[in-house]
Amino acid sequence: MKYLLVMGLLLAVGCTKEAPKAEVVKEKKTPGEVKLEPAMVKSANIMSVAVESRTQALVLAVNGRLTANEDRTWHVDSFTEGRILKLFANVGDRVTAGQLVAQMHSHEVHEARSEYQRAKTDLAKLQSQRSYAERTRDRMKRLLELKAASVEQTEHAESQLRDAEAAVKNAQTELERTRVHLVEFLDVPAEDHPEHKAGDFAHDEDAVPIKTRNGGTVIKRETSVGAVVKAADGVYVVSDLTSVWMIAALPEDQLGKVRVGMNAQVKVQAYPDEVFAGKIVRLGDQLDVETRTVPVRIALANPGQKLRPEMYAVAEIGAGGATEAIVMPQAALQDFNGQAVVFVDLGDGKYVVRPVRTGRVQGANVEVLEGVVAGDRVVSRGAFVLKSQMFKSSLAEE
C-alpha cells in the first residue's frame, strides 16, 4: 500500500496543469522525471551505476531480542536478615569488584558481638584456671620430690592441667569463630566503638555492608531503602555487558539447517548501519507450541557496550546453498516521504524517480526485491541534486 501511495505522489509531482489555449503546450514528461542539461550533470558530479544480478549465499533471517550474558551475570544478595539503610547504586551504574553498594542494619551484629564478648570472658576465665592448674601441678611435682605428696596426687594435678589446657583451646576456637563471623562474614569490627552508647546502633561501624563480588553494570535493583530483607534476598543484579546474548526464534522447519558454532550477523534498530558478529552457542531443547519456534542463543562481543539487554535484533545465519539476487549500491537509496526510492538514469540527462523495496545489506550493496531490474542504471552519486530539481519543478508547475 505504501508503495502505491508513493507512486501516486510521484505521479502528482510529474503532472502539469492544462496549458491555456493561447500558450504553447510544454513537452510532456514521464511522471517523476527530472531533465538536466549536460553541463549541469557534469557540474553536479552525478554518477550512475548498473543494477546487477549476482549469486549470493542463502541466509536465514531470524528475529529475537538481546539479553544479558547469564554466564557473566551475578546477583548481589543479602547474607543475613535485616533492614536496608542505604543504597549507593542505581540501574545503569558501573561498579567494580568489592564495591560497597548498600548498608543494612541487622540484629545479628549485636548478637554476634555479645557472643564474641562472652567468648573473650570465657577464655580469660579458662586461662586463669589453666594458670592455677599449672601452678598446682608444679607444686605437686616439688612435693613429690620431697616425698611430701604421692604419685597419685601428682598425676591428678597433671590431669587437671591437661583438662584446663583443652578447655582453653576450645575457648580460643570459639573466640576465633565469633571474630571471623563478625569481621569476615558480616564485615563489621569485632569490637564495638568505645564512644558508642549502649543501645545506640546508628553508626556505620554497626551497619552490615553489602558489596559486589564482580564488576559490571547494574541491570536491576531488587529492593529499596527501609525494606526488610532475609538472608539470600536479592539486592542488585550486576552483569558484565561487554558480552551479551541474543535469543533468536528459529522456525521449526529451519532447525535442520542450523548448528552450534555457526556464525551469525546481527543488526539492531539503534545502529542500522552496523553489523555485530556473533556465534551460535546453544540450540533450545524445547519447541514453543504457540509460535512453533526454537530458541537459539547467539553470543555477541560488546566491547563498546552499544548493545543493551531487551533490544530487538535480527540475526542472519548462513543456511548453505546460493540464489540469484538483484543488487545495487546502498548509496543509490534515497528517502521520499518515508519510502525508499532511486533515480533511474534514462540517458540524455533524463532521470526518473522509482520506489524500491530492499532486502539484505551486503557491505556497500543492498538487495533489491522490487522496483528495478538488472541492467537498469541508478544514480549512486549526486542524487540530492535530482531531488532538489524535482521539488523545484513541482513548485513551479503549481
Image (tube, grey):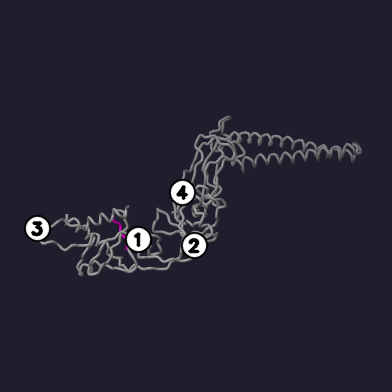
Residue type (three-letter) at the residue carrying disc 2: Ala
Q: Which of marks 2 and 3 is nearer the N terminus?
A: 3
- Start and end of the magenta stretch? 331-336
In whole angstroms, how far apart are the C-alphas of marks 1 and 2?
23 Å
> Considering only order in the chain, which callout, 1 or 3, is on the residue closer to the N terminus?
3
Q: What residue type is labelled 1?
A: Glu
Q: Which of marks 4 and 2 is nearer the N terminus?
A: 4
Report, in whole angstroms, how far the alpha carbon at label 2 lies from the one at label 3. 64 Å
Amino acid residing under circle 4: Glu
Question: Looking at the image, which is closer to me, 386 or 224?
Answer: 386
Q: Which of 206 and 224 is in front in this view?
A: 224
Residue 21: which numbered mark, if any? 3
According to the image, label 2 marks what residue?
A: 319
**Would residue 184 be found to the left or right of residue 249 on screen?**
right
Image mark for residue 370: 1
Instruction: Choose the circle earlier in sequence order: 1 or 2.
Output: 2
Going 46% across and 47% down the picture, which residue do you hit?
A: 93
Circle 3 or circle 1, nearest the eye = 3
Provide residue 85's location: percent of width, then percent of height.
Answer: 51, 36
